[in-house]
Image: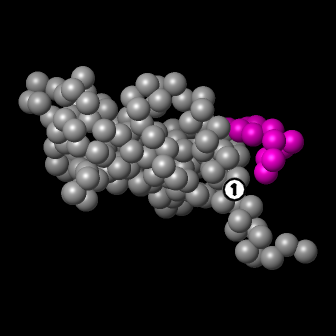
């Protein structure tokens, strides 16, 4: 008989395996040197350093790169249950600028999940823990699995 602790451990292992598999497949995220730091059921943590090619005309990080960072965190978080999940809609509010060399950390938390949809919030902070942006994503679950059953918990 499995204990509650065993079930939580299994869920954490599954979440990490799903996030790692999606990261392995995610060429866009890897191309921008976004790192997957951690994941748990309904959560993820990613990091990106603002590089010179990410700057727009005001010499601050282009919002599209910050959106991509948050969207990657959202994607990893909502796919931690071995159920393929995509974005149904997303929005972002830019709170403060990010500059070349800034290390941005995006933390995603699941707010609700039921049926085929979910809601997730992402906060982006810089290396000084200053809030840079707030992102909200709504997810839609597809049919199928991310990992085949024979590969789960290997």
Q: Is residue 137 visible?
A: no
Which residue is drawn at the image coordinates 41% and 54% (left, top)? 107
Q: Quadrant of the N terminus?
A: bottom right
Give coordinates of residue 56: x percent, y percent.
16, 26
Magenta stretch in the rendered image: 141-154
Label 1 sits on a secondary structure element that is: helix
**Per the image, is 147 magenta?**
yes
Q: Is residue 89 above or below residue 27?
A: below
- In screen coordinates, is 26 left or right of 102? right
Given residues 55 and 123, the one toward you in this image is 55
- Name which residue lies at 19% across and 42% down: 98
Viewer-side residue, 146 vs 127: 127
Residue 152 appears left or right of 71 = right
Q: Residue at x 60, y 44 (%)?
A: 19
From the image, tell me which residue sits under label 1: 13
Verify whether residue 69 appears in magenta: no
Viewer-side residue, 88 vs 10 = 10
- Name the magenta segment's main secondary structure: loop
Image coordinates of residue 153 in percent, x first then y, are: 79, 51
In the current view of this chain or complex, which residue is farthest to the right? 1
Q: Position of residue 150 (x, y in %)?
A: 86, 42
Q: Could you tell whether 33 is left or right of 52 in the image?
A: right
Q: Is residue 102 visible?
A: yes
Q: Where, by quadrant of the figure, is residue 102 drawn? A: top left
Residue at 67% from the left image edge and 47% from the top image edge: 17
Mark 1 nearby-residue class (10 Å; few <14, some 14–19, many ≥20): some
Q: Where residue 133 sits: x, y (%)?
A: 27, 49
């Amino acid at each position: 008989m499995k204990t509650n602790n065993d079930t939580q451990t299994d869920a954490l292992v599954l979440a990490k395996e799903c996030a790692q598999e999606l990261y392995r497949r995610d060429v866009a995220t890897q191309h921008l040197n976004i790192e997957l730091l951690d994941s748990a059921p309904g959560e993820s943590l990613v990091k990106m350093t603002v590089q010179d090619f990410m700057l727009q005309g005001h010499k601050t990080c282009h919002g599209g790169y910050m959106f991509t960072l948050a969207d990657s965190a959202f994607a990893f978080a909502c796919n931690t249950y071995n159920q393929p999940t995509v974005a149904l809609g997303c929005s972002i509010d830019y709170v403060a600028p990010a500059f070349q060399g800034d290390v941005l950390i995006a933390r995603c938390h699941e707010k609700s999940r039921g049926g085929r949809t979910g809601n997730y919030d992402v906060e982006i902070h810089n290396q000084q823990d200053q809030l840079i942006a707030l992102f909200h994503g709504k997810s839609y679950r597809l049919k199928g699995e991310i990992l085949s059953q024979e590969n789960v918990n290997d």
